[in-house]
């Protein structure tokens, strides 16, 4: 799955987390075993763990030897030595002790049962009236007939014989039992503390790794999107890019947390639980097998039905974001046309589509949890039922059944954790695919492999040489065979009707789009052969829609970089005709600017945007219909200041108003993407029908006559 491509980057932390989870699971799964021993050995057997007694009376030593097979008698006699009338265990080798324990289980159990029935059986054995070998063989056959697991019964009976022997010798069996209970209780407490430490360590590294994955993804997506051209932005849409940068990355981050902590822990604890169950030799393992098959089938069914829905739900989130953005940005228009109710219904539909899909997935999950609980409860019932029969038949101990129940609960809980993965991982995988779409997208506008060297000093001459352009996937050119030159120190204006390609033409210079035919050059160098940072460092761009950033007036004007000093800032504000309204503010250049410049008027916002471009002291100034919010007087003063102060820069102005362009050194007239006129105002009134039509729509007859004179 693609989501694991991001998690794989944290493989070192994942390895450490796995080790901590294994330690946690080992401690957690050892606790039921210790609980079983506390019940079986500590309580039922009085703390006596083995059929091998540390001390034996002479009589008991003789009785055990009578019931031992010939092959084990030598081992038994070597293991004990007589001291002060008592046989004392002298063997310390672990393997020999285990062999001796297996050998003494049957004799010890037989002696305990004989003692329970009275002294007659023991007397007959000691007198030779009954043969010890025959008694032992008959007992083995009887136990085998009762079931395949007689060892627990034998061990318990043999331990009771050892405990009774200690009491006959005057040893304090109560203290022995208490020592055993305390020892195992402290071991369980230590394992619990170790388990908690391992869990805390795993959680710490999990949280840090998941946060690092989210941080790196956000950084990578942000830097990728920053390098996108307008074509790539339009392809994904702003709403979708916001969703991918926020919601989708958050899904991956949350799934990374769950994967590194829960989904890795579930199989570990499940495997250890199954292994522990197999070690119990309770005869009830088949119940766990049935439970595992049922649980796995339920989880697989859920994952198969839910996984395809997550790709759908992410697209629905995209649509909801898009609708929300449209409504919030278009509120004035919506209110002006009294379309509030219609937009509410549109938002409600987008919202309900997400709710319906989320409800479907939630219903699947809600059905799964009770189903798994049913499997777990039925498994518990089966274990108690068949385990009870095992206890009654003497083939199973109470503690073993309790451990079996605990292990089974862990195994089912592991499947419950995996069921959560079947919900989260498919959704995160859909999000990961959407993130990878962004990261794998190669921008059409990139730096050249070899940058062309520009002659110094840079003049800023802009030349369009037979330029054509069409938008991606469009059938027709937006611009066709455009050729003209904008000289430094001159004001070049571009005018034309709506849709004639004016803004598109300006966008080709800073490579917001790349030409599809011809070339755009600055000082004779194709802009595609210049690094983007170098190219855009030469250009001051004022977009059609003035955009300001939250901060202060100073931070907005100095947005081009820290190299801009106060003198440059104030000069730029003066040329942009912004110094007057700035000085009227109480805090001057330190006055706050809200996000998007919402706390200043449209004209002030446009003048600050112009000042920002001027402060960078570019060699090429681009104004994309940037004077539309200015009154005629401010427009005139601004153009005069530009002509006076920006003598070394090429200035290109896109405008709709004749008054803005009529004093330009050169006017380019566009119509349907083609140059249909080029010259000064008076010349174009005579030679260009398109220009004259625009002028007649805006100027009076007297002004037209004055222009022709």
Image (tube, grey):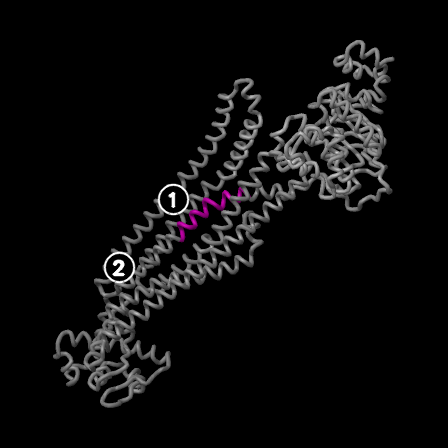
Contact between labelled residues 1 and 2, with CB atoms less than 8 Å apart? no
With respect to residue 668, does 226 lie above or below?
below
Is 702 located above or below residue 601 in the figure?
Answer: above
Q: Is residue 550 above or below residue 349?
A: below
Q: Quadrant of residue 660?
A: top right
Residue 672's spot in the image, x, y percent? 75, 21
Q: Residue at x 75, y 23 (%)?
A: 635
Q: Does residue 134 appear in this view?
A: no
Residue position marked by numbered label 1 in the rendering: 368
Query: Sequence-wise, which precedes: disc 2 or disc 1?
Result: 1
- Give how far apart the Cα atoms at labels 2 and 1 are: 28 Å
The tag on residue 292 is none
| Magenta-colored segment: predominant secondary structure | helix
Quick check: is 401 in the magenta stretch?
no
The residue beneath circle 2 is 387
Judge by depth and name the residue closer to the eye, 321 or 361.
321
Mark 1 falls on what kind of element? helix
2 or 1: mark nearer the eye:
1
Q: Nearer the viewer, residue 705 or 693?
A: 705
Q: Is residue 346 left or right of residue 623?
A: left
Q: Is residue 96 visible?
A: yes
Q: Which image quadrant is residue 591 in?
A: top right
Pick the front one: 20 or 615: 615
Instruction: Provide residue 585's location: percent of width, then percent of height.
Output: 65, 31
Query: How many residues crowd around disc 1 within 10 Å: few (fewer than 14), some, or many (20 or more)?
Result: many
| Total marks in image | 2
Q: Quadrant of residue 147?
A: bottom left
Q: Nearer the viewer, residue 443 or 681?
A: 681
Q: Residue at x 46, y 30 (%)?
A: 352
């Amino acid at each position: 799955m693609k989501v694991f491509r991001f998690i794989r980057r944290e493989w070192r932390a994942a390895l450490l987390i796995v080790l901590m989870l294994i330690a946690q699971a080992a401690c957690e799964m050892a606790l039921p075993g210790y609980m079983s021993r506390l019940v079986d050995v500590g309580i039922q057997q009085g703390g006596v763990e083995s059929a091998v007694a540390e001390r034996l009376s002479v009589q008991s030593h003789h009785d055990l030897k009578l019931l031992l097979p010939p092959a084990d008698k030598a081992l038994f006699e070597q293991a004990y030595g007589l001291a002060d009338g008592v046989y004392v265990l002298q063997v310390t080798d672990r393997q020999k002790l285990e062999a001796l324990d297996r050998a003494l289980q049957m004799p010890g159990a037989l002696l305990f049962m004989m003692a329970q029935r009275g002294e007659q059986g023991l007397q007959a054995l000691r007198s030779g009236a009954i043969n010890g070998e025959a008694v032992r063989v008959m007992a083995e056959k009887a136990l085998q007939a009762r079931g395949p697991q007689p060892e627990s019964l034998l061990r318990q009976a043999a331990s009771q014989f050892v405990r009774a022997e200690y009491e006959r010798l005057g040893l304090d069996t109560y203290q022995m039992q208490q020592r055993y209970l305390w020892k195992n209780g402290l071991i369980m407490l230590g394992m619990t503390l170790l388990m908690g430490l391992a869990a805390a360590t795993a959680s710490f590294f999990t949280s840090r790794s998941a946060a690092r994955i989210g941080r790196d993804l956000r950084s990578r997506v942000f830097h990728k999107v920053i390098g996108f051209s307008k074509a790539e932005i339009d392809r994904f849409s702003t709403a979708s890019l916001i969703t991918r940068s926020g919601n989708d990355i958050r899904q991956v981050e949350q799934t990374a947390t769950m994967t590194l902590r829960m989904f890795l822990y579930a199989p570990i604890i499940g495997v250890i639980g199954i292994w522990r169950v197999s070690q119990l030799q309770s005869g009830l393992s088949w119940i766990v097998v049935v439970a595992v098959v049922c649980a796995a089938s339920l989880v697989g069914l859920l994952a198969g039905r839910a996984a395809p829905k997550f790709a759908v739900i992410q697209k629905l989130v995209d649509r909801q974001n898009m609708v929300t953005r449209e409504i919030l940005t278009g509120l004035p228009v919506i209110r002006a046309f009294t379309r509030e109710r219609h937009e509410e219904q549109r938002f409600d539909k987008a919202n309900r589509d997400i709710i319906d899909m989320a409800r479907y997935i939630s219903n699947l999950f809600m059905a799964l949890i009770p189903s798994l609980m049913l499997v777990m409860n039925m498994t518990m019932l089966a274990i108690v039922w068949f385990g009870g029969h095992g206890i009654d038949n003497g083939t199973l101990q109470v503690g073993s059944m309790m451990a079996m129940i605990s292990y089974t609960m862990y195994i089912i809980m592991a499947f419950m954790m995996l069921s959560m993965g079947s919900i989260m991982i498919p959704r995160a995988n859909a999000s990961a695919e959407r993130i990878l779409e962004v990261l794998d997208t190669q921008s059409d506008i990139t730096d050249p492999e070899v940058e062309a060297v520009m002659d110094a000093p840079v003049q800023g001459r802009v030349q369009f040489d037979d330029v054509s352009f069409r938008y991606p996937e469009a059938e027709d050119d937006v611009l066709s065979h455009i050729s003209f030159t904008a000289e430094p120190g001159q004001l070049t204006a571009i005018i034309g009707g709506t849709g004639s390609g004016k803004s598109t033409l300006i966008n080709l210079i800073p490579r917001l789009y790349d030409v599809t035919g011809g070339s755009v050059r600055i000082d004779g160098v194709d802009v595609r052969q210049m690094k983007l940072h170098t190219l855009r460092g030469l250009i001051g761009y004022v977009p059609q829609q003035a955009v300001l950033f939250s901060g202060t007036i100073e931070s907005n004007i100095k947005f081009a970089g820290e190299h801009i000093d106060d003198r440059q800032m104030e000069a730029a504000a003066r040329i942009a005709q912004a110094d007057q309204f700035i000085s009227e503010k109480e805090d001057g250049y330190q006055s706050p600017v809200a996000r998007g410049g919402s706390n200043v008027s449209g004209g002030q916002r446009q003048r600050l945007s112009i000042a920002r471009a001027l402060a960078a002291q570019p060699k090429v100034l681009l104004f994309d219909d940037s004077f539309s919010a200015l009154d005629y007087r401010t427009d005139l003063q601004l153009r005069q200041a530009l002509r006076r102060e920006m003598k070394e820069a090429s200035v290109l102005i896109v405008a709709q108003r004749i008054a803005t362009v009529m004093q330009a050194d050169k006017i380019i007239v566009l119509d349907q993407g083609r140059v249909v006129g080029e010259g000064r105002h008076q010349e174009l009134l005579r030679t260009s029908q398109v220009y004259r039509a625009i002028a007649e729509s805006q100027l009076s007859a007297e002004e037209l006559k004055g222009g022709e004179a």
